[in-house]
Image (cartoon, rainbow, N blue to C red):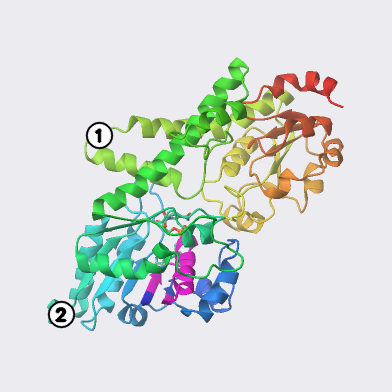
Amino acid sequence: MQVTVIGTGYVGTVTGACLSYLGHQVTCVDTDAAKIAKLQRGESPIYEPYLEELLVLASQRGGIAFSTELAGAARESDAIFIAVGTPPKANGEPNLEYLEAAARSIGRSMDGSRFRVIINKSTVPVGSGNLVETLVREGIEDTHRTGQANIRFGVASNPEFLREGSAVADSLYPDRIVVGAGDSQTLDLMRRLYEPLVAQSFDPPAGVPRPPQMTSAPMVTTTLTSAEMIKYAANAFLAMKIGFANEIANICEKVGAEAPEVMTGIGLDSRIGAKFLNPGVGWGGSCFGKDVHALLHTAREYGYEGKLLQASLDVNAAQRVAVIQKLQEKLFILKGRTIGLMGLAFKPDTDDLRDAPSLTIAERLIQMGARVKAYDPVAMPACKTQWPDVKIKYCDSMTELATGSDALVLVTEWAEFRKLDLATLAPLTSSRVLVDGRNAIQPEMAIRAGFDYTGIGRTVRARNGEMRAVLP
Ligand SMILES: NC(=O)c1ccc[n+]([C@@H]2O[C@H](COP(=O)([O-])OP(=O)(O)OC[C@H]3O[C@@H](n4cnc5c(N)ncnc54)[C@H](O)[C@@H]3O)[C@@H](O)[C@H]2O)c1
């Protein structure tokens, strides 16, 4: 099929590359000329493992082109995806200006030469499918005073569930594909578009093997409104699950239980499941906060107060700064101290800093008079550009970070932080305090290396001396 994807961010670029890898002929369109120029040179505008390799394979299979011009691509397409950003406004409501502009432009580009489906992949509030339909019609009216009746199109909601850092695998091997639509012609086209994914009939790319035992991907077809609600409900649940793990971890610290043991014990219950139960500095990223705020906002529009949703936001906000309290317990005074942050990206394997806990922690420390240094394997250039006013001293290595730091705080659990030579780092810091905000380091290893280790929900904080005494 001929496909246009509008927006070449984290979602649009991966969607375009995957659909083209499956054999569709794809054009990715963005208003950001610099991003398009990069993609035309074969470079990914974002850091996402295996994306550049997939773009090469995509160009050899279905074919993939990049453009700043929507009209021609949309006119030639059977399926037009909207994957533009929907960032939050100050009141929590998503900003739909990019979605609205895209929908209107699609309308202006349409003619009567074929039936097209316009697919909302952006996360949009309930009711946006209808809004897109209205805006496309208005766009059509802008350019076609007569003959509008010949222009046929359907609207589908196809929420995206990929995770940054494993976006290619998530897109090729999804847990499910959700399609909301109000008519059978739209659904038929969506079924044909996703047939290779549903049947898992494509050869996996060498770098992204198919999970063992995966033979198909379920397609869940729903109404437009249900599909929109599924995306919000999924993210709200995941945010709440992490918040729950954090709250239990905080209670574990008080009563002297080991949170990781508790999480293993509850996660083995098949009704609960082991994933998303790691206590830490809280969730971040472009989606959870934005989507929970948006769902709360929608609920309020209908006179409903989402108390559980609000609590999940509050728990997360407090959790981000819990590491600062741990630093105070160890160092007492933070004014004039130097704190080394290990990791800036909101999670490993991405350069995305949107709503990253690292920035909340850095800003709070700076406000309190501390000096902040940071080392991140990937996200430092993005941080320097996007947050020029946050006074962070960037370090090129862990050695540079540790040298002269009073304490280290692990904020992002990059794989390389799990494999550090802790014994060489500990003496470089002046107080040997290590706050592991992701429980990513084995406490015994850190203590043996000479660190004064504190995790999240771990009683080891109180038992460093006792453990040191018994360690070989
Ligand atoms: N990032 C994720 O992990 C993720 C996962 C699931 C869903 N989502 C949702 O997907 C949507 C896109 O997210 P993202 O992270 O890819 O955003 P992004 O900010 O990385 O990318 C959006 C892109 O859209 C472009 N754009 C804006 N208006 C445009 C227009 N009128 N025409 C063409 N291009 C336009 C921007 O220039 C930008 O490149 C959001 O609604 C988000 O909530 C994101």
SS of the residue under disc 1: loop
Q: Is residue 91 visible?
A: no
Q: Is residue 296 left or right of residue 416?
A: left
Q: Give above or below for 444 relative to 6.
A: above
**Residue 464: x %, y % from top left:** 77, 22
Q: Residue at x 56, y 35 (%)?
A: 320
Quarter of the image that includes the N terminus: bottom left
Q: Is residue 226 left or right of residue 342?
A: left
Identify which residue, 447 or 139, lies in the foreground.
447
**Residue 92: x %, y % from top left:** 37, 44
Tell me the residue that label 2 is attached to: 150
Quarter of the image that includes the C terminus: top right
Q: Determine the quadrant in which ligand 1 lies.
A: bottom left
Residue bounds of the magenta highlight: 4-27
Residue 304's label in the rendered image is 1
User: What type is the residue that disc 2 sits on?
Assistant: Asn
**Would you call the spot at circle 2 few (<14 residues within 10 Å), some (14-19), or many (20 or more)?**
few
